[in-house]
Structures are given as C-alpha cells and as structure tokens.
Image (cartoon, coloured by chain):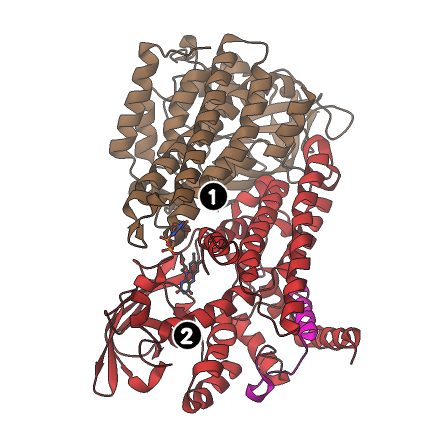
C-alpha cells in the first residue's frame, strides 16, 4: 500500500470513528492531556480497530506499520482533533516491559495496557528529587515476598485517574545514588497509598502528589533486577523524549493561529493576518518550526537505517517545546483581551452552554499558561542543554 | 534626568508598602479571588481611608493633587502584592474621566462617593469586533428626547460585576466604524433600564462581565466629556491608566525576581543550591536587567507626563512595549527556575505570571505599540 493510500484509509477510519464529543475533547485540549473520559473512549475505539499501539512490535499487539505510516497516522489523528492518548502506558511502560519485563509481567500487563483496562501513571519525581532524579529517597525494603514502600512522589500526572503507578524506589544506599534504585509496579488500591490533587495555574487538576505509607507490594512486581532501576528508567526516558513528534503539534498550532489571525482584528482595524509585525513574528517562528520538521525527518531516517538518534532527541525536546511556547505567545497577542475570560466549564467536551468571546480564543490563555510546563517536565530545557553540551560537544 | 521623590511621595510609597506587606498577604488575596465577590470590602475601605483612592485627584474634587508619579508609586505596590481591588478601573479610569469631563452635577453626585470607596465604577469600552482597538465602537447613541438612546454590547468589562456605575463608549457620529471622531462616553447607573450582563472571572483573578445595552435611555447630562470627542478627551486618562498597569507590572516583576532569587538559594539539586548553576545565575542577572530597564522607562514616562514633556507620548509607547517583553521574560523564567512548583496554584509565582500576561494584552499588545513607536 502506498503512503497516500494508507493516509486515505486512516482518514476514512477517523471520519467515521471519531464521534463529535471525542473530537470536541481533542479541540479543547489545553495541555498534553485531553479530557479523561473522552481519551479512554477513544483509546477503546482504537483498540477495537487494532490500532492502539503502532509503535509496539507486532508480536505484542503493534500494527506492523512502517515508520512513515506511523508518522502519517499520528499526523492524521492530530489534525482530525483526536484527543491525545495517555502516554504513560502506551509510550513509556509498554516498550519498557517488552524490553525488560518477565514473561509473566508481559502476559499480564501488556494486554491490559492495550485494552485500556489499566491506566498507568509515572512515579519518578519527588519533592526533593526533580532534575536530580537519582537522589530520590522513597524507599522499598524487602520483607519476605514483599517490598514495603515509604515516601512520596510528586507531579504525578493523572494519578487521580490511574489504577496503577510505576515507580522508581530506593532499595540500597550503597555506592553511587544511581546504583541503589529499583523499578517497581504498584497497584494504586494498595493499602497505605493516598493521592492528593495539585491544582494547576489554569485552575484544573492534572498533577498529584502520591503518598506511600508502609505500602506492601509483591516482590514479583520488580522490573529488572533489584538496583537495576536506573538503567530501566533511562531506557524509558529516551522513549519519553524521542518519541514525541513536535512538528505535528506545531502544524496544528499554526493552523489555529491562522484561523485566529484571519478572524481577529488588530490595531487600525486591520486583520492580524495583514499586520506586518505579526507576519514577521509568525514567519520567524514558522521558519524555526520548519527547520525542526526536517530535523525530525532526519532522525526518522536515522532510525529507519537502524541508527540511534542519541542527543538529537534532546535537541528536538528543547526546540520543540520552545517553538510551541512561542506560538502560544503569538496566539495570546492575537486574541488580546478575549483570552482573559476564564470559562473552565466551556472547556469540558460535554458543555453545551454559551461561550463568551470568539470560539477560536477559548483555549488560548489556558494553553499559554499550561505550556510553560513543557520546558520543565521530561528533563528541563536547562538539563537538555547540559546533555547536548556533555554528550555532543564533549564539554 | 534625576528623579527625586518629595517627602510626601516617599511617605506614600512606604506607607503603601508597609500596609500591604502587613495586611495584604497572598493567602488573604487568594481568599478574596476565590470568593463570590471579586474584591475585599474591608481592603477597599482601608485604601480609601488611607487617602489612596483620592491621591491623584484635584483638591477641589476632594483629592490630594497627585499626578502620574503618585499613580506609579501606588500601583507599583499593588503589583508587588498582587492587589485585585479595582483601583485601575474604578479610580484611574472611571474616577479620572468623571473628574476630567463629567457634567458638574454628575461629578458632584458621584465623584466623592467613588473616592470614598462607597461606589465602584467599571469602564466599558471594549467590543468583541476588535478588542485591540478602542476606536472600534459599534455601540450607538442616538439623540432621543433631549438625551440619547444607547444600543450595543461591550465585552470584558473588568470590575463589571461589582460596579455601581458603568462608563460606556458609544458612537454619536463618525463616518466609519473606526473613525476617531464621533465617539462619546456615557455614565450609567447599574439600575438603568435596558442594561443586562453576564458575569465571569478572568484568569488573573478579576471579575468581569459582558454588558448588553438595549434601548438604554440616558439624559444629556450623562455625557462625559464633549460629544463626539471621547478619543481626544480621554487620551490623558488612558495615558495614566497605561502608567498604572506598567507600574503594576514593574512591582510584579520585582516580586518575581526576589522570589526566584530566594528560591534558588534554598532549592537544592545535585547536592547544591541551584543558585550555583551558572546558567541560572545568568538568567537571574538577565531578569534583573529587564526589571531595571523597565523601571527606568516607567519613571521617566511618569515624570515626563507630569511635567508635560513633548516626548512623553513616545516614552509611554516605548514603556508599554517594553513591559510586554520584560514582563514575559521575567515571568517565564521565574516559573522555569522554580520548576514544577512554579506551575501550581498554591505558589504566588504563577499568579504574578497571569497578571503580567493580562497586562501584556491590556490596552493593546506589544506588537501594536512597536508599530506605533516606529510611526511616532
Ligand atoms: C506539568 C508537569 C507534569 C509532570 N508529570 C510528571 C509525571 O507524570 N511523573 C513524574 O515523575 N514527574 C512529572 N513531572 C515532574 C518533572 O519531571 C519535574 O518537574 C522536572 O524533572 C524538574 O524537577 P523540579 O520540578 O523538581 O525542578 P528542579 O529540578 O528543582 O529545577 C528547578 C530549576 O533548576 C534548574 N536546574 C536544576 N538542575 C540544574 C543544573 N544542573 N543545571 C542547570 N539548571 C538546573 C531546572 O532546569 C529548573 O529550571 C511533571 C512536571 C510538570 C511541571
């Protein structure tokens, strides 16, 4: 099948499979997450079609698509306003289990990730361990067939919706800090585990703090050997960073700004699209976005040839997030005072009341606010630049 | 140019700083923001009692004769303590315009009560057809039985839900929808028949509304300023309002810089305070430079406006453009350097960020001022 035929097939599927409500949830996204219920509804539809995990090996439920086809699929989903799927199970834990998990773990957990029966969250960061993740102190002490976990994880995205959490825990204080960390899978129903929501800047809850008080977890839930967790986590982080396709996000952002600039008036009652300052600024960001698009294509080429993108994934993380933030700023300037109106209810997909101000500005401020986090999570912009300096430039 | 504050001015700044530091804590501010009412009655009354509300009004209006510098001194502190009370809307704009051009009987009736904190006002000048351009007025006021009949709608009327008085712009003439001539201002009581509204909150913790005007009858005395001359007539007050928000921005940036410097000294990663990392030290040095450059422009602008300097407008345009850029730089980096904790509702950092974002777009965004700077 040619790529174009494939694209046609994907489009035809999206056309009939994306219900109005699910599409609405995609349109109303103001962060990397969409409305939870709509996300899971979409997850189940894709699962039923067999398209839930294109990046997984076919033997484990993948689609067997080429890299190009996977890219086309992502792009078409995004442009059709499909809500983003939760990455914690599909993008992070799944590939990691395929690589490091035991047969039992794979047989049990992978199908549940695919079906959406399990919703996973990522328990890495702690109040005292952010950029310096290896300094984490949440401890797991072996007691018979169990580990007993004490401590706390923070910024855990969507923990309030999850039934499982994968954690990095300290199993040894000997040697360098990286050498005493293990990777463990925890049932959120376990006794002694509690979840506190954290209200974000837009007034909604996406992150949580998770507390562990003598939480008992079967030792069989360890992934990799005891004290091998850092290696496991590093493998996973590469997926978190390299797996994202920023160009698709940028294309969607550009299309949105174009709609805004074609409908909103600026100084001297000129449409923004005709305003020379706006045009120059838009072009400036768009040129960087184009350069990044070709960088992502280079990476894809390397991957196809069996190479490893290495530190180029740090480049795309820094540039991808910063370009996205610049687009957010442009949107804000175009929407002006309209963006100040806070209408959280109108940002939920089921809402059918009145919307204040132009529809194209409904998400602008929340997107601008929430996207500041993009240069903080998944390795901050400073840490990524450090990685480039060290690994690429040998400094 | 050397600006030396008078003894009264220094006292005003110090007393505002002291009062707000001791009483206007972030926790109390948040309690107000999250309450049904968008402001604290108690705080507003105190602002009036301390003479702040009347500070920049003429003595014959019951004020203390202050100018742009006094506006700056107060608003900088309001910015630093994230004050949400409607000083800008009720006092600088509505109070300022009433003093400048309301009919004497109207002024008599309302100004004193505004400055004593008894009444509040909200300027209603934005329309959804174009929020970037205050000249884009489609609301009409047609002569009607010796007065006017007003029809139209206004958007993002900040402090609208609390206002007893609305100051509404409407077109009484002018050939095109965005002509400078032909815009007039009208002062309306909330009870005026034909007004209706829909209230909401804004991201920066204010209350605001959409205002509909349907066959609203007003008498000739409710016109503020000369008929058809609102654009020219309100210009000095708009300038003052821009100084006010820019001063607020400088106060907010200052607070963000201090908070970030403090946090970086306490927060440890990789076994050391993050303030040791050179890239963060340089970033904070850059933040400092942006704050001070903006402060210089602010001081110069206020001083030039007060002394009627010929280049005051040019400075004002530069100031608003600079605040757009510096405010963003400082706020973005304050959050960045705080890491995850900076993205929460719990810390004040994010609330300064949202206020700076709002100030960035209010009265036109940076781009429009850059274009005007080039023209001037
Ligand atoms: C929206 C959001 C979602 C998240 N979701 C999850 C999740 O699901 N699971 C999870 O485990 N975590 C999650 N995180 C946490 C995220 O990974 C951390 O916030 C991140 O690692 C930074 O850690 P920190 O917040 O403690 O900041 P810190 O590490 O304290 O950093 C503060 C500042 O110091 C800088 N800095 C630190 N070290 C250096 C250095 N060596 N050189 C130069 N600068 C330095 C940082 O770049 C930053 O600017 C999320 C965070 C956010 C904001």
Mark 1 crowd level (few <14, some 14–19, many ≥20, 10 Å Cα): some
Whether residue A177 is visible here, answered yes or no, is yes
Circles 1, 2 touching at the beta carbon (< 8 Å): no
Magenta span main SS: helix
How far apart marks 1 and 2 lie (CA) works out to 33 Å
Q: In which quarter of the image is the C terminus of chain B?
A: top right
Nearer to us in this view, A238 or A9 = A238
Q: Closer to the camera: disc 1 or disc 2?
A: 2
Question: Left or right: B233 with respect to A139?
Answer: right
Label number found at residue A53: none
Residue B295 lies in quadrant: top left
- At x 45% / y 51%, what residue is drawn? A382
- At x 59% / y 17%, what residue is drawn? B313
Q: Which residue is identified by label 1?
A: B332
Q: Which residue range is magenta in the image?
A: A56-79
Q: Does the magenta stretch include residue B5?
A: no
The image quadrant in which ligand 1 is located: bottom left
Label number found at residue A232: 2
Residue A147, x across and y down, in percent: 25, 80
Which shade of the palette goes to chain B? brown
Question: Left or right: A223 with respect to B201?
Answer: left
Whether residue B158 is visible here, answered yes or no, is no
Count the numbered circles shown. 2
Q: In this view, does A229 lie above or below A378?
A: below
SS at circle 1 = helix
């Amino acid at each position: 099948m040619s790529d174009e035929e494939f694209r046609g097939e994907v489009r035809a599927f999206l056309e009939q499979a994306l219900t109005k409500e699910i599409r609405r949830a995609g349109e109303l996204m103001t962060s990397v997450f969409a409305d939870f219920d709509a996300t899971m509804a979409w997850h189940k539809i894709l699962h039923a079609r067999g398209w839930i995990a294109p990046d997984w090996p076919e033997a484990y439920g993948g689609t067997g698509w080429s890299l190009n086809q996977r890219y086309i699929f992502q792009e078409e989903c995004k442009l059709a306003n499909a809500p983003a799927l939760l990455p914690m199970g599909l993008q992070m834990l799944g590939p990691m289990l395929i690589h490091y998990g035991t047969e039992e773990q794979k047989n049990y957990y992978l199908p549940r990730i695919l079906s959406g029966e399990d919703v996973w969250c990522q328990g890495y960061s702690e109040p005292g361990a952010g950029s310096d993740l290896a300094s984490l102190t949440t401890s797991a002490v072996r007691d018979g067939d169990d580990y007993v976990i004490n401590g706390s994880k923070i910024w855990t995205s969507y923990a309030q919706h999850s039934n499982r959490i994968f954690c990095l825990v300290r199993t040894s204080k000997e040697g360098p800090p990286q050498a005493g960390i293990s990777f463990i899978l925890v049932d959120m129903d376990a006794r002694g585990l509690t979840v506190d929501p954290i209200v974000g800047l837009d007034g909604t809850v996406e992150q949580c703090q998770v507390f562990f008080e003598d939480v008992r977890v079967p030792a069989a839930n360890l992934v990799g050997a005891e004290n091998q967790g850092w290696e496991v986590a590093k493998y996973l982080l590469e997926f978190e960073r390299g797996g994202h396709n920023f160009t698709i996000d940028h294309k969607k952002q550009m299309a949105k700004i174009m709609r805004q600039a074609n409908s909103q008036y600026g100084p001297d009652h000129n449409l923004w699209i005709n305003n020379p300052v706006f045009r120059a600024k838009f072009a400036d960001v768009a040129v960087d976005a184009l350069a990044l698009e070709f960088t992502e294509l280079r990476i894809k080429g390397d991957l196809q040839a069996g190479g490893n993108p290495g530190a180029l994934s740090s480049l795309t993380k820094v540039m991808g997030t910063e370009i996205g933030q610049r687009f957010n700023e442009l949107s804000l300037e175009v929407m002006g005072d309209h963006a100040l109106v806070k209408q959280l209810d109108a940002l939920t997909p089921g809402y059918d009341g009145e919307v204040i101000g132009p529809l194209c500005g409904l998400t602008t401020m929340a997107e601008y606010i929430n996207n500041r986090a993009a240069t903080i999570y998944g390795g901050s912009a400073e840490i990524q630049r450090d990685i480039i300096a060290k690994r690429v430039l040998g400094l | 140019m050397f600006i030396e504050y008078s003894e009264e001015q220094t006292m005003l700044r110090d007393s505002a700083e002291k009062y707000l530091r001791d009483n206007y804590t972030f926790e109390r501010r948040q309690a107000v923001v999250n309450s049904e009412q968008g402001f604290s009655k108690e705080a507003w009354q105190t602002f009036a009692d301390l003479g702040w509300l009347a500070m920049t009004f003429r003595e014959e209006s019951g004020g203390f004769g202050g100018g742009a510098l006094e506006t700056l001194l107060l608003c900088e502190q309001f910015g630093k303590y994230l004050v949400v009370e409607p000083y800008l809307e009720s006092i600088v704009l509505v109070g300022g315009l009433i003093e400048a051009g309301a009919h004497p009987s109207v002024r008599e009736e309302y100004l004193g009560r505004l400055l004593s904190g008894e009444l509040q006002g909200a300027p209603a000048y934005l329309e959804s057809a174009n929020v970037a351009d205050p000249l884009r007025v489609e609301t009409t006021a047609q002569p009607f039985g010796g007065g006017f009949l007003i029809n139209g709608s206004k958007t993002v009327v900040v402090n609208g839900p609390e206002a007893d008085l609305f100051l509404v712009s409407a077109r009484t003439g002018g050939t095109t929808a965005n002509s400078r001539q032909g815009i007039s201002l009208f002062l309306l009581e909330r009870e005026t028949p034909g007004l209706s509204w829909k209230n909401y909150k804004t991201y920066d913790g204010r209350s605001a509304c959409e205002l509909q005007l349907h066959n609203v009858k007003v008498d000739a005395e409710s016109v503020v300023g000369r008929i058809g001359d609102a654009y020219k007539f309100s210009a000095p007050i708009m300038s003052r309002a821009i100084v006010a928000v820019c001063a607020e921005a400088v106060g907010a940036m200052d607070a963000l810089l201090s908070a970030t410097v403090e946090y970086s000294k306490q927060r440890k990663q990789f076994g050391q305070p993050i303030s040791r990392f050179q890239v963060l030290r340089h970033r904070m040095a850059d933040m400092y430079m942006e704050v001070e450059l903006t402060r210089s422009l602010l001081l110069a602008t206020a001083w030039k406006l007060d002394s009627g300097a010929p280049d005051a407008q040019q400075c004002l345009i530069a100031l608003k453009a600079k605040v757009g850029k510096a405010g963003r730089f400082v706020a973005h980096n304050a959050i960045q350097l705080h890491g995850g904790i900076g993205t929460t509702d719990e810390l004040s950092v994010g609330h300064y960020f949202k206020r700076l974002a709002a100030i960035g777009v209010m009265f036109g965004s940076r781009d429009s001022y850059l274009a005007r700077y080039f023209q001037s």
